[in-house]
Image (cartoon, rainbow, N blue to C red):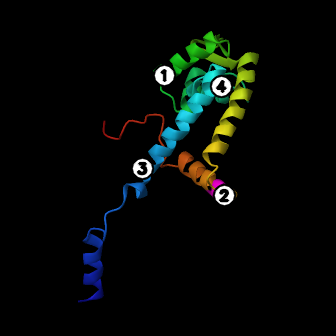
Amino acid sequence: MSDSASASRAASSPPARRRELEDDLHWGLVRLARGLGAAEIAAMRPLGLTVRGYVVLSQLVDGPARSQLAIGRAAAMDKSVLVTVLDELEQAGFVTRTPDPDDRRVRIVAATPAGRDVHTRAFAAILQVEEDFLSGLTSGQRRAFRLAVRALGTGPEAATFDTRPVGI
């Protein structure tokens, strides 16, 4: 049998053995995300925040006030979800929303001093959750994992603002 015929048959043949579920990338990433998400939810609860609230505050504390649209895009959050989160944050006294003087249809969102304070505490809590979450890895593995997540999470493979599957 020629080398090209062997290569062609090998390319069309099923894998020699079925992959274990533990080797499936999607399955593993979903389990990791759910575990980390549950730990972050628990860490935010005593602060009167949701994880989404933390994400929104993270968009506001280090910069100028921003429009709701800009926050939604930066946080990859649907408009209706964002409005609910902003309602909760505003009710808690963590943000203010004011009409844009140049376009009264636009709302400008700013973190309040209380919002900045709770974000500082939430940030520390998230760092602790991440530290605990990664505790089974060596420092080199932690660095590599974070770099890989950053590269994939900000690259073309990452979910966009609209996370519905293509074609729907």
Q: Verify whether residue 153 appears in magenta.
A: no
* Viewer-side label of 2, 3: 2
Q: Nearest the camera: 137 or 102?
A: 137
Residue 26: mark in rendering: 3
Classify 24 as above or below 56. below
Query: Which sits earlier in the primary sequence, circle 2 or circle 3?
Result: 3
Q: Amino acid at mark 1?
A: Val
- Mark 1 lies on a secondary structure that is helix
Residue visible at 55% across and 24% down?
69
The secondary structure type at the circle numbered 2 is: loop
Q: Is residue 31 left or right of residue 129?
A: left
Residue bearing mark 2: 138
User: What is the distance, in whole Å, between disc 2 and disc 3 at their CAs?
Assistant: 23 Å
Mark 3 Cα-neighbour bin, 10 Å: few <14, some 14–19, many ≥20: few
The label number, if any, that marks residue 81 in the structure image = 1
User: What amino acid is found at the position of numbered circle 3 in the picture?
Assistant: His
Position of 112 relative to 131 (above/below) = above
2 or 1: tag closer to the N-terminus: 1
Q: Which residues are magenta?
A: 140-144
Displayed quadrant of residue 10: bottom left
Say if mark 2 contacts mark 1, CB within 8 Å: no
Dot 1 or dot 4, earlier in sequence: 4
Per the image, the residue denoted by label 4 is 57
| First-in-chain label (4 vs 3) | 3
* Residue drawn at x 59%, y 27% as measured from the top left: 71
Q: Earlier in the sequence, mark 2 or mark 4?
A: 4
Camera-near label (4 vs 3) is 3
Q: Local crowd at mark 1 within 10 Å, few (<14), some, or many (≥20)?
A: few
